[in-house]
Amino acid sequence: MPDARYAIAAILVTAAVTWALRALPFAVLAPMRASTTVQYLSARMPAGVMVILVVYCLHDLPMTQARAVAPLAALAVTVALHLWRRSAVLSILGGTVAHVTLASTIFAH
């Protein structure tokens, strides 16, 4: 059984490290908010991330088979909903529902 002083010291060190690790991102990000590079990236990254995700999800999709229709139709629904309403939540949910519905009913193996 460890000594009480050792246990208290271990708890205090653990608490200090936990607090420091949680506070560190805020301390590091505060000076970066005024950076023009960070402002540029915050404006451009969402579209870039979405392009990367689309390419990753569709890169090995067999375009010559019927099972490619469900993901492509869901992509079309997602883009159409987003252009129509400009709502990320609506477009993501709509595309997900379209894909799940098509993949589990019409284009099920």
Image (cartoon, rainbow, N blue to C red):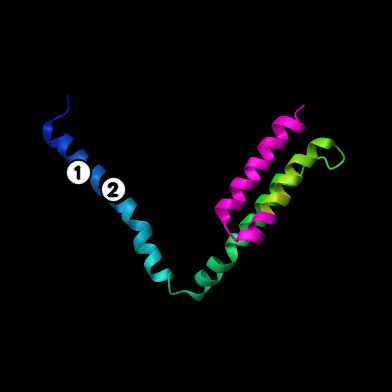
Q: Mark 2 points at which residue?
A: 17
User: Could you say whether the residue bearing mark 2 is in a helix, strand or loop?
Assistant: helix
Residue that extends furthest to the left in the rendered view of this protein: 4
Q: Earlier in the sequence, mark 2 or mark 1?
A: 1
Residue type, label 2 = Val
**Residue 12: numbered disc:** 1
Quick one: 34 or 67, which is closer to the camera? 67
**Residue 55: numbered disc:** none
Residue 32 vs 99, above or below: the answer is below
Is 85 part of what is drawn in magenta?
yes
Residue that extends furthest to the top in the rendered view of this protein: 1
Residue 19 location (% of width, % of height): 27, 50
**Left or right position of 102 against 33:** right
**Left or right position of 101 against 43:** right
Q: Main secondary structure of the magenta part?
A: helix
Q: Residue 41: in sight, yes or no?
A: yes
Is 105 part of what is drawn in magenta?
yes
User: Could you say whether the residue bearing mark 1 is in a helix, strand or loop?
Assistant: helix
Q: In terms of image quadrants, where is residue 4?
A: top left
State yes or no: discs 2 and 1 in contact (Cβ < 8 Å): no
What residue sits 53% from the left and 66% below the top? 42
Residue 72 location (% of width, % of height): 76, 46
Quick one: 85 or 70, which is closer to the camera? 85
Residue 7 location (% of width, % of height): 17, 34
The magenta stretch spans which residues? 80-109
Residue 65 vs 77, above or below: the answer is above
What residue sits 60% from the left and 49% below the top? 92
Q: In which quarter of the image is the C terminus?
A: top right
Residue 106 vs 93, above or below: the answer is above
Residue that extends furthest to the front in the rendered view of this protein: 84
